[in-house]
Amino acid sequence: MQNFQNIAVLFIFVGAVGYLIKKFFWNPIKDKNKSCGSGSCGC
Amino acid sequence: MKVSLASLKKGQSGIIISVVTDNIPLKLLEMGCLPGNEVELLQRAPFSCPMYLNINGSHLAIRKEVAEQIEVELM
Amino acid sequence: MAKQINVSLIGNPNTGKTSVFNLLTGLNQQVGNYPGITVERKAGVCKLSRGLKAHIVDLPGTYSLNASSLDENVVIEVLLNKKDKDYPDVAVVVSDVENIKRNLLIFTQIKDLDIPTILVINMADQMLRKGITIDIPELEKRLNTKIVLMSARKKQGVEELKKSIEDYRKLPVAPCLNAFEIDPEYFGGLQRAFPKESLYKLWLVITQDVNFANINRNTIADASQFQTKKNSELKRLQQKETIKRYQFINQTLKATQTIDIKNAKGVRAALDRVLIHKVWGFVVFLAILLFIFQAIYDWSSYPMDLIDGAFAWMSDFFREILPEGMLTNLLVEGILPGIGGIVIFIPQIAFLFLFISILEESGYMSRVVFIMDRLMRRFGLSGKSIVPLISGTACAIPAVMATRNIENWKQRLITILVVPFTTCSARLPVYLIIISLVIPTHRVGWFFGYQSLTLMFLYFIGFGAALVSAWLLNKFLKIESKSFFVVEMPNYKIPLFKNVAINVFEKTKAFIAGAGKIILAISIILWVLGSFGPTEKFSKAKEYVTTQYQENSAEDLETQIASYKLEHSYMGYMGKAIEPVVRPLGYDWKIGIAIISSFAAREVFVSTLATIYSVGSEEEETIKNRMASEINPVTKKPLFNLATGISLLLFYAFAMQCASTIAIVKKETNGWMWPSIQFIFMSGLAYIAALAAYQFLK
């Protein structure tokens, strides 16, 4: 029982770390070139 | 008498004669600020900017700099 | 097999388009984002007859297809690209009875795009009152369309609209006027060069920065034989086009619409006289603000206490029924408090969005923008910055998203950068707990207590910092941008409950989904870091402590073991490592850790402390009691004294401590530069302020 619990905790931990990394460091690929998305566009 | 829209007093109305085209955003024209349309100054904000107008039935607020580019014939 | 009809809802803002959308889709709607940009995408499903379904997208409100802002651009992107998944089988243009003239501009433009179009005239119940009569069949003929009269408020006309959508194939597709008479030579040439494309489509491509499937601007400039016009000529042509369209609209309405009484300058004018008054306008606004903040504060405390109690109970409950072990500990000490920390200020956020939504729906918000504009511009902001700034007191994330209707890029950027200074809900739990610990409860005069004064002061500091930073940024940022401030002043309306409710629901949901997951992940990580240690000291903690303090009671030993374990866990080592940096501010390593974790989300401070203080502890004292009993090992006096408290309060007031906010600023400004600058500036300010406060007060 103890082992199961420990392994479960490990999985959850890795999952949490993975989620944060994905959220902050994964840049979504832009499939459309939206010209009005750029910051300097004064539109 | 021809004056700039910016100089209207509260409650005054006029007919728009011309619009200095380069400085006026297209949006304003699209909202009805066109030569031939009637405009009435409803109120000015504290410090007299922006201006609350009734242009051709549309109730809008625009800044003074923009109003200065619009020429109006007083009614 | 249910077939699907794609429908686009288009129209001016303030026509009740959203109400129509809500009537058609009810709760079957989803709010998301358009890919790559932070413009809200609202889509929903409506069941028609015979198993047909309408997939409806509520496009951002716009006055014309000539886009002047990011969200208006979305409208063209959808309508010009046949391959776009939202490209409509039928377009529904929503107009309102009072502003038909202006509303019809975009209607005529859409008719030029070869898309079957239905015209909805909303607020039809007002027609009688305003003395307006419309010859519908004649108008339908001249506009070449089907007209549906609706009153979204009274829920009238929905069935007719649904039927018209179903029968969309019967709609005439031809345009209602020939706008290209303004320059037959130029347009004739254009059409000949690209015979397969809709002429208006080509024209839009030339005049805007639009990319879509098979044609872009460069193709047209290169490939054609005829002279392409200069920008100023194009602009003049656009103006001519607008004038031509209005001529058509004026003629058409003259023939089909009669207005009998010059109505109700009545209510609107009377209200405006007060609400935009030089003095009363501000007084009323201030009073409303104060009321809102007080109400949120008061009303939320009851549900918050309930939630607090519920989660505490759940912790007890689970600890009892679940088998002992690491997973149970993770659940009870890490996950539950983590979730509780998010859930507990849903009431505040929901209430704030409720008020903002009511103010917007009623039309009052435009008046606020109107009176605040001049003042805001002194600080480099726009009158339209007021909504983001107020929203920021709930959460900076929807606040940053609300800046997209600010036309001037510099003003918009500055607003985005300073909004995180406003006191968001996440700071409140930190403020409240520190205030109740270190600020005395005396009252000044018979109405104000020190504690509430401190809280008010913190709010002012937040706004003050935002304004001062805005002013500084305005001075030092050299960015060229044109100013196109045009604000519509809609008629006053009684807010529709359904709209407000759906709005609040969506915003709250977005906040929970966005920030919530990040916080949960961090809670898990924190707990793990605090429950495992790298060295023997951790695993053999019990032995160490017992041998050292043999003479202590069993209870004391328990707490000492817990404390020793914590000190030698991963988290403990991290805290110790930064302790020299935070000691001048009056903090110890435990507070240090809580601050680090707050850099992911501020409210995590409280739940981190909850975790820190309950890790290893079997009792469920409330956090406050535990904190009050913490002793500073150096001074032997309570750790949470006035100096440390104030220092903490100031730190939290200024520090950029929210990963979710950084993420959205990055998205909105398209890069890491601005959020990085923001982070460094705010954190630096926070450190200095906290340092000064502690050193001065200790």
Image: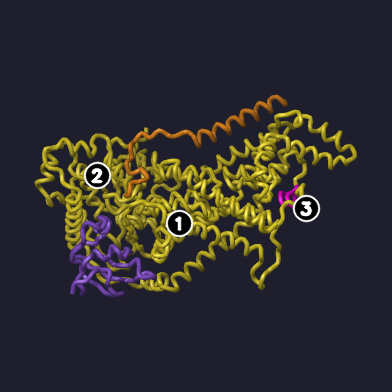
Relative to the observer, which residue lies in front, C107 or C549?
Answer: C549
Residue density around tag 2, few if under 14, some if 14–19, many if 20 or more, within 10 Å: many
Chain whose colour in the figure is yellow: C
SS category of the residue bearing label 1: helix
Furthest residue in direction right, as rendered: C551
Which quadrant of the rendered structure holds the N terminus of chain C? top left
Q: Quadrant of residue B15?
A: bottom left
Name which residue lies at 75% across and 45% down.
Answer: C620
Relative to the observer, which residue lies in front, B3 or C87?
Answer: B3
Q: Is residue C509 visible?
A: no
Furthest residue in direction left, as rendered: C185
Q: Which residue is mark 2?
A: C116
Q: What residue type is disc 2 on?
A: Pro
Q: Chain of mark 2?
A: C
Mark-to-mark CA distance, 3 and 2: 77 Å
Which quadrant of the rendered structure holds the C terminus of chain C? bottom right
CB under 8 Å between callouts 3 and 2?
no
Q: What residue type is disc 3 on?
A: Lys
Per the rendered image, the range of residues in magenta is C621-628
Name chain A's colour: orange
